[in-house]
Amino acid sequence: MNRSGQSHILAIGGGSFRAGERQGVLQASPLLRYALDLTGQDRPKLGLLATAVGDNPEWLLKMYGAFAGWDVEVSHLALFPQPTVADPRAWMLEQDMIYVSGGSVANLMALWRLHGLDEAFEEAWRAGVVLSGQSAGALCWHVGGNTDSFGPELRAWSDGLALLPYSCGVHYNAEAQRRPLLQQSVASGELPGGYAADEGVGLHYVGTEFIQAVTVDPGGYAYRLEHDGAGGVKEFRIEPRLLTS
C-alpha cells in the first residue's frame, strides 16, 4: 500500500450517487472519483459502510452496483446482526478509501463506539486511508452539525468523531431548516465554527486543514461559518472547483 502519508477527508453535502439509465440503478458521481484519486492507487480498495441505514442490504447492493465498471476493489463492513469481518480494525487499515452512507448519524456513532470503530477510524485516517461520506457520512468526521436523527425537526448535534475540529452543514441549499439552524448553533456557541456544503458539493480536508471545495453542480457552493465576536455568525461563500468527470 503506497500511501502519501497525508490524511484526507472528503465530506459530501449530497450528490455522491446519480440515477443510472435503468430504474433503481445508481452511478457513482465524479465526487467519488475525486476521492478515489486521492488514494494514489491505480486499483484502490474501497470499503463501504451503511451503518447509518442499519446496514440495509438493498442500499449496500446499490452502492456495489454504482461502481460497476470502475477499476476498484469493493468490500463492505456491516455490524448487523454481527460484524461481517473478523477484525474490523484490520479491515479498515487494509482499505485505501472508506465511504460512509447517509442516514442516522446519531445511531451510526452509537454503534461505532459500541464496536470500537471510533478509535479504528482515527487510526485508519492517521495511516492515510481516505475517509469520505455523504450527509451522516460527512457529519461524523466533524464535531457535529444538525441532524434529523431524532425526528423531522432538525436538532443540533455535537457528538461526532471530531477528527475535524469544526461544525459541518450538509444539504445546505436543499432543506430549509439546515442553514438557519447551523448559523444559530454556531452563533450561540453550541457548535464551533465550520464549513457547509450544498447538494453536489464536497469539502476536502488534508489533515485538519480545509483545502478546497469541489462540486458536480455548477450552481453549488461551500461556506465557511465563523463567530462574529458579538453573539452572531459570519458566513462566507466559497467557490468550489467544478468536476466534469
Image (cartoon, helix red, strand yellow):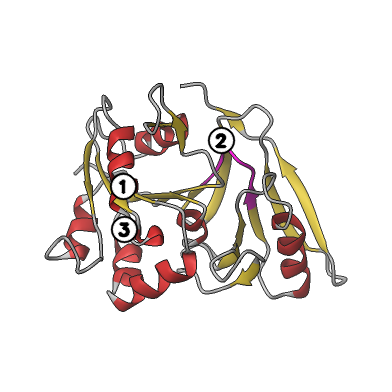
Residue nearer the viewer, 42 or 25: 25
Question: Is 200 covered by the magenta stretch?
Answer: yes
Mark pair 2, 1: CA separation = 29 Å
Question: Is 239 covered by the magenta stretch?
Answer: no
Of mark 2 and mark 3, the one earlier in the sequence is 3
Residue situated furthest left in the rendering: 86
What quarter of the picture does the N terminus occupy? top left
Q: Residue drawn at (41%, 21%), measured in percent from left and top?
A: 21
Write down the region rendered in magenta. Answer: 196-204
Q: Residue drawn at (72%, 69%), measured in percent from left and top?
A: 185
State whether residue 55 is above or below residue 21: below
| Label 3 environment density (alpha carbons within 10 Å; few <14, some 14–19, many ≥20) | some
At mark 2, the secondary structure is strand
Circle 2: residue type: Val
Residue 214 numbered mark, or none:
2
Residue 58 numbered mark, or none:
1
Residue nearer the viewer, 41 or 221: 221
Task: Nearest to the eye among marks 3 and 1: give it.
Answer: 1
- In the figure, is residue 75 to the left or right of 9? left
Q: Position of residue 141 (x, y in %)?
A: 47, 61
Q: Is residue 97 visible in the rendered structure shown here?
A: no
Q: Residue drawn at (24%, 37%), measured in percent from left and top?
A: 44
Q: Position of residue 139 (x, y in %)?
A: 52, 59
At mark 3, the secondary structure is loop
- In the figure, is residue 5 to the left or right of 12? left
Mark pair 3, 1: CA separation = 9 Å
Residue 55 numbered mark, or none:
3
